[in-house]
Each structure stands twice: as C-alpha cells, then as structure tokens.
Image (cartoon, rainbow, N blue to C red):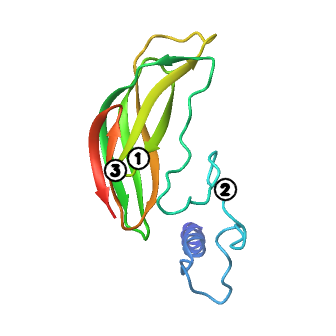
Amino acid sequence: MRRLVVVLVLAILATACGAPDVIGGGSDPEPTTSIDPEQPVDSGDEPIVEPGPVGSIPEPRLPIEGSVDGEVTVTGADVRIMESFPVQVALDVTGEKPTPCHEIFWTVEDDGDVIEIEMISQVASDQVCAAVIEPFTIAVPLGSWAGESREIQLNGELVGSFES
C-alpha cells in the first residue's frame, strides 16, 4: 500500500510540473493582448494634440477670471531640449504653491529674442483649503523650433536658453 501511495504522489507531481510554455514559440501563437493595433491608445486625462507650427509657442494655461491669485515659489527650472527635428523645447519647473487647492497657471510671450513666462497659482474665491505649502512639478511646453535661438525668463529671471 505504501508503495502505491508513493507512486501516485510521484505521478501527480510529474503531471503537475509538465513542460514549460515557450514564449514566442509553439504551433499556436496566440495574441498576448486584447488591444487592437489599428485603434489609438487612450493616454489618460489629457487629450493628444497636434504640435503647433515650427517657431510658435503652444497655448499657455491662462488664469481664470474671478479666482484669487497666489504666489508661486520657484525652486528649480530646467530647459529640456528634446532630440527631434524640429527641436522641441519645454521648461521643467519645480516649486511650491500656497495650498493644495491652488492650481498653477502661466502666460507666455515671445518677442523674438526672449520667451517670457509668467507663472502664478490660483484658487477659487469660495474654496476653503488648509494653509499647507505643497510642492509641484510642471512642464511648460515651449513649442518646436528650427534654426532659431531664445533666452527663457521665468517670472522676470533668466532660467536658460536654447539654440536650434
């Protein structure tokens, strides 16, 4: 009887282990995903937008009228130049806003030599929020450029430049 139990346990173990599946092989290649390769992929909350014309700055995130302006303390700003043609430029900004309820807004002006970015925070006038400083990181898109150069100023201070 004991021998029969040992043989049964070994048989069960041998059939349970089986042969491993070969990735990318076999006679019946099944798709590993249900995503249709012909359909666009949803990238989240932000819509995918077409880039603007070369040498133009994308639409800024304008302040909302009727909201209360707040300070933005900038702790760092880095110009990011993406390896593409035409060159795409963004300004990565880190800082602090007065409360978690404040949102970051900016305007951008380009005079041909300098791109001036004014950044503020705003909160709805009727919103109640804890007065706790909250850090933020945001990327400000500055558009596509070919054969041009600009200095970049943020809230009146020079933070970098680029040459395409």
Q: Residue at x 39, y 52 (%)?
A: 112
Amino acid type at mark 1: Asp
Can residue 15 be seen in the rendering of this structure?
Answer: yes
Amino acid type at mark 2: Asp
Q: Nearer the viewer, mark 3 or mark 2?
A: 3
- Label 1 CA crowd tier, 10 Å (few <14, some 14–19, many 20+): few
- Quadrant (top left, top right, bottom left, bottom right) of the C terminus: bottom left
Residue under numbered circle 3: 113
* Marked residue nearer the N-terminal end (2 or 1): 2
State the CA–CA distance, disc 3 to disc 1.
6 Å
Q: Position of residue 143 (x, y in %)?
A: 47, 55
Amino acid type at mark 3: Asp
Residue 21: name its quadrant. bottom right
* Marked residue nearer the N-terminal end (3 or 2): 2
Location of residue 108 with respect to 163 vertically, above or below: above
The disc at residue 111 is 1
Of residues 51 and 137, the one nearer the viewer is 51
> CB atoms at circles 3 and 1 under 8 Å apart?
yes
Q: Is residue 153 left or right of residue 143?
A: left
The disc at residue 94 is none
| Secondary structure found at label 3 | loop
Q: Residue furthest bottom?
A: 27
Residue under numbered circle 2: 42
State the CA–CA distance, disc 3 to disc 2.
37 Å
Q: Position of residue 98 (x, y in %)?
A: 43, 17
Q: Position of residue 110 (x, y in %)?
A: 43, 46
Residue 119: name its quadrant. top left
Location of residue 19 with respect to 101 vertically, above or below: below
State the CA–CA distance, disc 2 to disc 1.
36 Å
Q: Position of residue 18 (x, y in %)?
A: 57, 77
- Quadrant (top left, top right, bottom left, bottom right) of the N terminus: bottom right
- Label 3 CA crowd tier, 10 Å (few <14, some 14–19, many 20+): few
